[in-house]
């Protein structure tokens, strides 16, 4: 409840006229009405076009800023120790060993001297392999991704 009162206080300061009293000097029933409006705004009910529109917009926008700040906090760079811990927990596995016989373009890859997942990973552009065009390259990439996905379940 204290958070909503502080939110109302800040919105009132930003929306009141020069001759209007400070939030804490308002009569209790008026503060209660502002609190009720703020709760309705936070529940997503409405923004009026009446005399309280500026107050309501400040309430609504303050919750957006709070959400953006929370997102920014989550996006802060991780410390080296935390990064290392996360890497240990979520190690991404890649397929290793010989390419299976049913691997797309297996014969063409073998002719090019590519017999393992490691050798295939070193190829930047699959279409540079003799006999592998864009369609086969896409099939190979799709198969690699499927194999990685299977390993990382």
Image: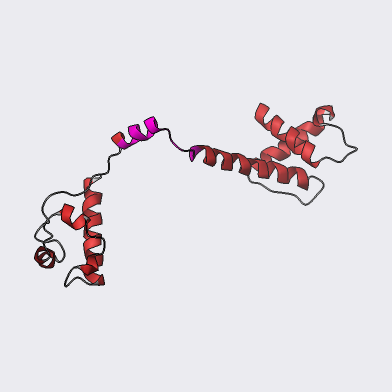
- Residue at the (75%, 49%) spot, across then down: 48
* Residue 152 picture location, percent across and down: 25, 45
- Residue at the (66%, 30%) spot, across then down: 3
**Residue 63 falls left or right of residue 101:** right
* Residue 153 picture location, percent across and down: 25, 45
Main SS, magenta residues: helix
Residue 111, by quadrant, is bottom left
Please name the colour scheme applied to the rendered image: secondary structure
- Residue at the (68%, 32%) spot, across then down: 4
Residue 60 seen from this side: yes
* Residue 116 picture location, percent across and down: 13, 54
Residue 1 seen from this side: no
* Residue 97 picture location, percent across and down: 12, 50
Q: Is residue 77 magenta?
A: yes
* Magenta residues (range): 74-87
Residue nearer the viewer, 5 or 98: 98
Residue 145, by quadrant, is bottom left
Q: Is residue 18 magenta?
A: no
Q: In which quadrant is the N terminus drawn?
A: top right
Residue 119's place in the image compared with 2, above or below, is below
Residue nearer the viewer, 80 or 102: 80
């Amino acid at each position: 409840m204290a958070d909503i009162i502080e939110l109302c206080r800040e919105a009132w300061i930003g929306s009141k006229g020069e001759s209007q009293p400070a939030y804490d000097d308002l009569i209790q029933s008026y503060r209660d009405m502002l609190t009720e409006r703020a709760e309705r705004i936070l529940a997503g009910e409405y923004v009026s076009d009446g005399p309280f529109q500026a107050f309501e917009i400040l309430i609504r926008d303050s919750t957006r800023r709070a959400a953006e700040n929370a997102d920014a906090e989550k996006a802060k760079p991780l410390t080296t120790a935390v990064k290392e811990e996360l890497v240990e927990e979520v190690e991404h596995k890649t397929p290793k060993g010989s390419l299976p016989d049913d691997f797309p373009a297996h014969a063409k890859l073998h002719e090019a001297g590519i017999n393992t997942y490691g050798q295939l990973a070193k190829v930047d552009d699959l279409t540079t392999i003799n006999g592998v065009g864009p369609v086969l390259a896409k099939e190979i990439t799709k198969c690699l991704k499927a194999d990685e996905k299977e390993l990382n379940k």
